[in-house]
Image (spheres, grey):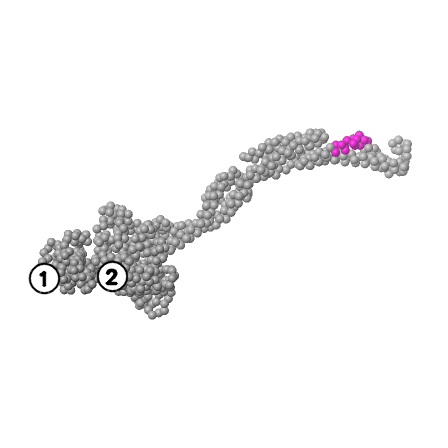
Amino acid sequence: MSSPGQWQRAGTDWSPTFLSTIKVSGFRGIGSTAKLDLHPAPGLTVVSGRNGSGKSSFAEALELALTGTSYRWRERQSLWSESWRNLHKPNPCAVRVEFTREGTGPVTVGVDWADEAQLDDRDLWTQSGGKERTKGIDELGWANPLELYRPVLSYEELGRLFDGGPSVLYDALAKLLGLDVLTAVEKKLSADLKVAKESRDAADGERRQLVAALGDITDERAERMATLLRKRPPPLDEVIAVITGAGSPELNVVAALRDLSQLTVPSIDEIASAASQLRIAVGDLQRVAVAAAALVDKRVGVLHAALDFHQHAGDTSCPVCGGGQLDADWMARTRSAVSEAETALAEYRSATARLKAARQTAAGVVGGFRQAAAVPGVELAGLESYNKAAIKAGEVPSDDLELADHVESVLVDAVGAADVLREQAAAELSRREDVWAPVAEQIAAWVPNERHARESDDQLKALTAAKKWVTDNGTKFRNLRLKPIAAQARQIWGQLRQESNVDLAEITLTGTATKRKAVLGGSVDGHDTQALSVMSQGEQNAVALALFLPRATSIKSPFRFVVLDDPIQAMDPAKIDGFVRILTDIAQTHQVVVFSHDDRLASVVRQTGVNARLIEVIRESGSKVTMRPNVDPASRLVSDAHAMIKDEKLAPAVKDRIAPSLFRMALESVASQVHYAKQSIAGESRVEAEAKWASAKSTKTRLALAILGDPAADLSNWLKAKPHRKHAVEVGNAGAHGVRGVSDVDVSDLRRTVKDVLAEQ
């Protein structure tokens, strides 16, 4: 086994410690101050007392002082914790527990309550030697040992050890193993793993929700996005491209719809203006005669030539006709005519240019109607009408006025078709965007969460591997550490199981977290089974003791005392015999204090001749609790007989009738004690001893069984050997009619006879 130093925590004191005294005032069943003195050394002490005598109040006071609570009150209704003050004398209310500790001397732990204070409103303090009191018990360094090696076991804890199921037993055994460092590592890894998993689980959870949401959307982007999000891992660059519309061929439909919703065609005003301009240009040109323009052009050309001739020849006769004079008047007239002709020509040319421009404008308006491409997978009722209108708009007539009519009629119809198509495309686009946009926003918000999760994925893998390793090996470590303790528990059960057909096999710890459990293997009459499932309550309590005692008596524990409160309630006599032998072994190295509600345990101690200190707790009126040595029942009956004889208020006739019963009970009680002691020393079972005792029906046969080992043996010689023996037996056998004149001498004979029987042990 490992030394305590290997398991020592900072601030833990492992000095061997024994109990000296427990002093209680105003607490539970104790009113005025009562003090239980104990021998602070290895040995067995049995404290007996009837139910309600106040004996358990000492155990509860010790438990409260050390742990701050009591199993008696845990998970119980408030009634259990509200009646903690004594009813008869609730104040002062205090507890004092004195210890002796190797190397430091006496230590006192005190608990005080002010008048009317609640249970939790207590003042807990420690005093070592003659030093000043300090608050709490932290300075004792027992925090860790009390968790691992709790030295107090109450009947409530014994009974509840299996009530909470395999996980509670798992925790109780795990504490014993001292692998709290391993437990801390498991908890730390679990906590870190939880944090690391949170980001991954959150991102994956969002992703699954997004995929589900995308399934309800009829949109090429949604289909593409769902495909991307199902990949492991999802390609985030492609996801972002779909959200933003960058480089995604799947977005052609949306782009086409957007283009159609923004389809541009000439406006009605532009069409009307083009038609008007064309008609005006045609009218203007018609007003300028083509022939007149040609004549003017020729005349202007001749006149320009004449002017040029005159410029060089000066005044002279007409070079053409030889008549007329090309003089200044002629020149003035000619210049005026030329000017008028040039103006007319300019007007003609301008009208021609305007007509050409009007034609170009009309052509431009006609060309503004291009055919629209169909959108894959989308039906737009106005698309075919518009395309037909666009084709018709392009069928341009050659006549200018017909062209004007064409523009004003056909193109206006095409504008209407374009408006219808544009509205339908916009509506379809809006419908898609209304469904897609919110999901796209959610996906955009998910992307950074996914990036963060990927950053912790490596850590998550490492933590998962570490947690699995610790979990797998932790179970092995725990069971390896549990193995010698389990073996000790099975050994103890082997002594406790007297006459039980349930054998205890391997004890193992399995699982983790909510699936953790302790498995107690066993067999019944050679058939394997789960031990607890076939055990009675008494057997379960015995197993609980078998599991508790190795923990409480571990060599690593500083507590060299073990306190058991009512551990034998559900035990049959055979198991009590085994229990006493176990306690005797433990008492070689530990101070063992057992509180018992009846005298069965003390009787077995007497019968087996075990060296133990027996104390009886007596509760008088007003919750006054006192202690006295717990003498054997026979000696007590002798004392009762003596007290009866001395009672002057009791009539002699009554004394004569009562005396035989007291004498008979005393003789049979001492015979029983000696018989069972002899049987125990001889190694016989309790069942065999009880069978022999049951075969003896009378006082004489029972004395014969105890003294001579045979109920049928002749007891005469033993009775005649000393006259007081025969006389005491005769009084006991006097029957209902009693004896005459019972006296101190008779009681003295009884006392001497009881001692003689005890000497036969």
Please tell me which residue is depicted at 36% across the width and 52% down the height of the picture.
Answer: 470
Q: Main secondary structure of the magenta part?
A: helix
Q: Nearer the viewer, residue 11 or 236?
A: 11
Residue 310 higher or lower than 664, as above or below? above
User: Is 289 contained in the magenta span?
Assistant: yes
Residue 361 higher or lower than 680, as above or below? above
Give, as a three-letter code, the residue at label 2.
Glu
Q: Position of residue 391 (x, y in %)?
A: 63, 31
Question: Can the viewer see residue 752?
Answer: no
Give, as a three-letter code, the residue at label 1.
Ala
Tag of residue 616: 2
Label 2 crowd (10 A; few <14 / some 14-19 / many >=20):
many
Horizontal relation, residue 340 to residue 463: left or right: right
Please tell me which residue is depicted at 46% across the width and 45% down the height of the picture.
Answer: 205
Q: Nearer the viewer, residue 300 or 129?
A: 129
Please tell me which residue is depicted at 35% across the width and 69% down the height of the picture.
Answer: 131
Q: CA distance from mark 1 to mark 2?
A: 35 Å
User: Is 265 contained in the magenta span?
Assistant: no
- Badge 1 is on which residue? 721
- Image: magenta residue range: 280-295
